[in-house]
Image: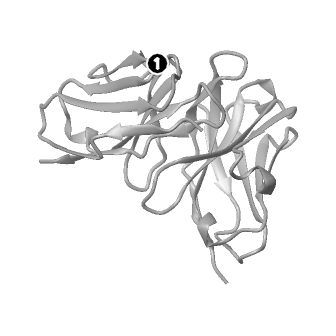
Amino acid sequence: QVQLQESGPGLVKPSETLSLTCTVSGYSISSGYFWGWIRQPPGKGLEWIGSIYRSESTYYNPSLKSRVTISVDTSKNHFSLNLSSVTAADTAVYYCARGRVTTVTLYYFDYWGQGTLVTVSP
Amino acid sequence: DIQMTQSPSTLSASVGDRVTITCRASQSTSSWLAWYQQKPGKAPKLLIYRASSLESGVPSRFSGSGSGTEFTLTISSLQPDDFAIYYCQQYNNYPQTFGQGTKVEIK
């Protein structure tokens, strides 16, 4: 059974960098699939942040691209999100998820982590 | 970005009702559309992919249809466990985008 678990600080100061890790169990992260981050501000909808494929290719939402980095550590079977220069607008529940490939670059998310709330506040 | 618009935003229904949620895209997404169910404090759960394919383990009372710019999610007989928020997601174009959600509440 594939499981994903987010971890990282729950509180980040404005202008600093938000860093989260998603640890995957039950599947080797290097074997394929996309691995992505999605966020949800309190009481609002879902926003795709970005995804990575096989440690090689990264895809970012243009609205966040200048501030986002996603990377993979295959030795630890986890992938990470860094979001720089955060503001209160970045306060959200952050989810990691596995992207099931339908064609070369098209995928939807079949397994999700439970989510972690990150608050941006002084 | 492709805008996804769901209607209605809130739907009041009773157990046993047939429920239909609509998702409209601002441009064609072919059949590359998924539906998710989210309960309070939980992660979204995949229900439907490729517009009409039922995810393994999802009850058969859920079904999806449509292509191009108009899609529907139907629950044939609403059960107590189905009261939740439902989101559509297009994954045909970057960036992937989600609808704003439809809350199904108890009438």
Displayed quadrant of residue A28: top right
Asked whether A109 or A59 is in front, the reply is A59
State left or right for residue A107 relative to residue A29.
left
- Using the image, determine if residue A64 lies above or below residue A101: below
Percent coordinates x, y for residue A77 in the rendering: 79, 40
User: Could one spot residue B2 in this view of the protein?
Assistant: yes
- The residue identified by callout 1 is B68
Percent coordinates x, y for residue A78 in the rendering: 77, 44
Displayed quadrant of residue A25: top right
- Residue under the point 76% across and 49% down: A65
User: Could one spot residue B58 in this view of the protein?
Assistant: no
Percent coordinates x, y for residue A122 in the rendering: 67, 84
Q: The numbered mark 1 sits on a residue in which chain?
A: B
Which quadrant: the N terminus of chain A? top right
Displayed quadrant of residue A12: bottom right
Number of numbered callouts drawn: 1
| Color encoding of the figure | one colour
- Using the image, determine if residue A119 lies above or below residue B74: below
State left or right for residue B91 relative to residue B73.
right
SS under mark 1: loop
Asked whether B65 or A79 is in front, the reply is B65
- Residue under the point 76% across and 74% down: A15
- Residue under the point 38% across and 45% down: B101
